[in-house]
Amino acid sequence: MYLPRHFEENRIEVLHELMRTHPFGLLITQGEGGIEANALPFLVDPAKGPHGTLLAHVARANPVWQQVGDHAEVLVVFQGPQAYVSPNWYATKAESGKVVPTWNYVMVQARGRIRALEDRESVLGIITRLTERHEAAQPAPWVVADAPAEFIDTMLGAIVGLEITLSSVVGKWKLSQNRPAADRDGVVSGLQRSGDAAQAEMARWVQRA
């Protein structure tokens, strides 16, 4: 992706955190049928490999796990906060009028080699970890063992695990860093005035940038 230096984020712990807090990634693959995209919830294991490892699963009926083949290179895109930025918010508008609209966003692109996992223990491990991660905030978290064992076995047979050993992780934090301080303050105020929760979140990101 196009990545000007002032928007680049390369601290691996920051990139992994974005992937954890916005885990619904877009898996992009190139197979015999061309380019495909599958949206999946991912787990990131930061301790496995120099750039970390991603874990997910797909339905066995989804042909993507067979089409790409083991160890094919894939791309996973994680989208964080994003918001439209109006030129009306810039102090520069009153000074020169030389302003245009733009879009602020946070994104991580992770590349690596994919491997399908079909054995029961690997798939169960992925499902268990995903469940624990996303049920943690529930008052009484659901666990895999809450369902009948034979039902779980049937479900496990209907899915395939995916493991992606990452070779690179790149972040783009486009948060008005290229604008003067007065313009950045105007962006924060404009986003906050909207009353929209997503825009308020972007305002916080711009303030921290």
Image: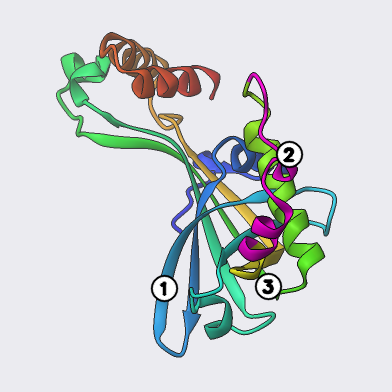
Front label number (3 vs 2)? 3
Residue 88 percent across, percent down from the top left:
18, 19
* CA–CA distance in space, label 3 to label 2: 21 Å
Front label number (1 vs 3)? 1
Between discs 3 and 2, the one toward the N terminus: 2
* CA–CA distance in space, label 1 to label 3: 16 Å
Mark 3 residue element: strand
Between discs 1 and 2, the one toward the N terminus: 2
Residue type, mark 2 in image: Glu
Of 23 and 186, the residue lying toward us: 23
Question: Which numbered dot is residue 13?
Answer: 2
Residue 169 percent across, percent down from the top left:
64, 55
Q: Is residue 30 above or below residue 184?
A: below
Residue type, mark 3 in image: Arg
Is residue 118 a member of the stretch shown in magenta?
no
Residue 97 percent across, percent down from the top left:
14, 24
Residue 25 percent across, percent down from the top left:
51, 52
* CA–CA distance in space, label 1 to label 2: 29 Å
Of 43 and 172, the residue lying toward us: 43
Name the residue tied to disc 3. Answer: 113
Answer few, some or many: residues within 10 Å of disc 2's Cα (few below 14, many 20 plus, some between 14 and 19).
few
Is residue 154 a member of the stretch shown in magenta?
yes
Going by the image, does 192 lie left or right of 107?
A: left
Residue type, mark 1 in image: Glu
Front label number (1 vs 2)? 1
Q: Is residue 52 visible?
A: no
Going by the image, does 151 lie left or right of 194?
A: right
Q: Are marks 1 and 2 in contact (CB under 8 Å)?
A: no
Of 170 and 54, the residue lying toward us: 54
Mark 2 residue element: helix
Name the residue tied to disc 1. Answer: 36
Q: Are marks 3 and 2 in contact (CB under 8 Å)?
A: no
